[in-house]
Each structure stands twice: as C-alpha cells, then as structure tokens.
Amino acid sequence: MKIAVVGSYGAGLTMRVPRAPVAGETLSGGRFASGHGGKGSNQAVAAARLGAEVSFLTAVGRDQFGDAARRLWAEEGIDAGAVRTADAATMVGFILVDDDGENRISIAPGALDELTPTDVDGFADRIAEADLTVVSLEIPLPAALAALRTAHERGVRTLLNPAPARALPDEAWEWIDVLTPNASEARVLTGLDPEDTTGAEQLVELLRARYTGTVVLTLGAEGALVDRGGRRTRIAPVAVPRVVDTTGAGDAFTGALAVALTRGDDLTDAVRYAAAAGAHAVGVAEVIPALPGPDDVAALLRR
C-alpha cells in the first residue's frame, strides 16, 4: 500500500483547561504539553502506523520544530525527502482542550505559506507511484489543487479532507475521488454559513449538485453518512468509554480510511475501520500518542 500525503506540519502547543476562558479572563489551573501536529503530518503518521508506505510533502522552518518533525517522520518510517525547508518559522498551533475533550485551535502558518505548486512538481514521481493521494487544506490552496490535479492526471485516486474548508474552483471537483468533510466543512463547500443548521442528508444533496465522486460526511458522535453514486449508507459510531481529547480524531479517521481504501476494502467497511481509528484517538490525550496501530483498531471493531 503506497500513499502520498500533501498537507501541513505544525508544532502543537496544547493547554488543557477546566473550561475555555471568556474574553478578557485569565484562567489558572491549565496543564501544558507540546507535540507534533498539522493535519497532513498526522494523517501521514496514522497511515504509516496502520501499515502503509507513506511519502509526505509539506514545508517546515529552519528551527527546532522543523528538526523535531524530521525526527518524527524518520521514526515512523515516512519518506520525507521532498519536504521543503523554508525561511519562515515552522507552523505553530495553539490548542485549548477543556474537560469535556472539546478543542479550540489558533494557527500561525509560517513556513506552510511558502509551499507552492513547484514543490508539488518535485513530488510528482511519488504521487505517480502511489495507490492513493491524500490532500488537506491547511496548506496554500494552489499547492493543494496542484497535488489533486497531478494525481488525477496520472490516474492516481485522490482523497480530499477539506479542512479547513474553503471554496474550491469548479474544475477542482473532477480531480477528487473521495471527499471527507464534516458537517461544518460541507456547509462551507456548498456556500452555506458554517453555523447553518442544514442536516446531513440535505448537505449531501447540496454537494451532489457540483460533485459526482464519493462523499464520506463525518458526523462525530453520530458516525458518518456515506454516499456513492446516490446510494447512501449510515455508519454507526464506534463507542468509547470516555472522551479525553478530540484533537486528532479526524486525522486518525482520514489516515485509516486511506489505508483501508488502498488495500481494497469495501467502502462501508473502510469507513467503519476509519471510525474505529477515530474512536481510539479520542480516548487518548495528545495527537501522536493517540494515533492507533492495527491492534488498537481491531480491538474496537471486535467490541
């Protein structure tokens, strides 16, 4: 299984707090930890831990965070030979996690803003060798679109995790084989307000007005809604004893879905596998420690 990932890396600076402070409030009692983050890197690690051969493209700075990232990828067996070293600082994300496991994130992109379609051109051979290319949107949109287009032109299946969501040009939709938005991202993609209350079925209908590929609409604690060619299936959530930290759940889901699709699983089975990976992640604090191995996912599926 060969997977090419084009996305972000950032250092995650996490503070766990009893609750999120309101404007102007100083709240004591937090617990701080720093670690690896960025949707692309998290998804690459998740896929590698589940058995895929992963190549990764991103941009990092000439700093301690960039050095730490390269050590992580080496430890996880990820091919990071095409990663760009930029003059700007490595991306940093500041994350607040409350006692209910909900998170709030603010990001300084830094080096990621220097990632360009030219960097994607240098990664084209790895994309061409892959069975699946995974793209997320924390990187500049021209680079993300170049990755989707490059894979499409080379006959490589694509998976777009549209996070954070933004409007896509009309021509980009035909380059996407599998689209994995959550509900708020689907609203942005269809031109609705992120706070709109349109339900899951209606969101898929709106996506279908411009997109003919496979939709996997993730619904958090309500599971997922899968639509392939107009045939829809609800995927039940995988229960977990306790929610500790939701930060890495979406990336665990995406990495696991990529692995399952690449090895040839049926779509609904692949989404169930991904849901179990995401469920495992919410039960463990911090992102990288929470990304599961095959035995972790199998244990949840047996339950």
Image (tube, rainbow, N blue to C red):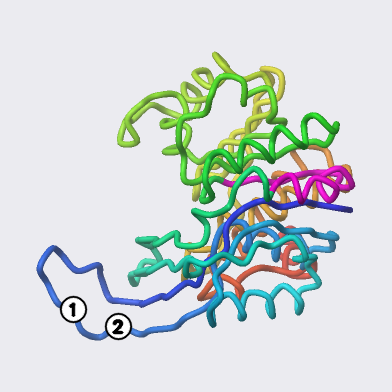
Query: Residue at the spot x=56%, y=44% of the render?
Result: 223
Q: Position of residue 176 (x, y in %)?
A: 68, 30
* Point 84% across, 59% down: residue: 52
Residue nearer the viewer, 91 or 62: 62
Q: Secondary structure at mark 2?
A: loop
Along the viewing direction, whichever of 240 and 4 lies nearer the viewer: 4
Residue at screen point 54% across, 62% down: 38
196 to 98, vertically: above or below: above
- In which image quadrant can residue 27 be found? bottom left
Which residue, given by chain and number where applicable, does mark 1 sit on?
A: 27
Residue 125 falls inside the magenta stretch:
yes
* Mark 2 lies on residue: 30
Asked if the magenta segment contains residue 130, the reply would be: yes
Quadrant of image for the C terminus: bottom right
Q: Where on the picture, by quarter, is residue 41?
A: bottom right
Residue at 69%, 20% in the rendered image: 231
Q: Position of residue 108 (x, y in %)?
A: 39, 62
Q: Is residue 251 left or right of residue 24?
A: right
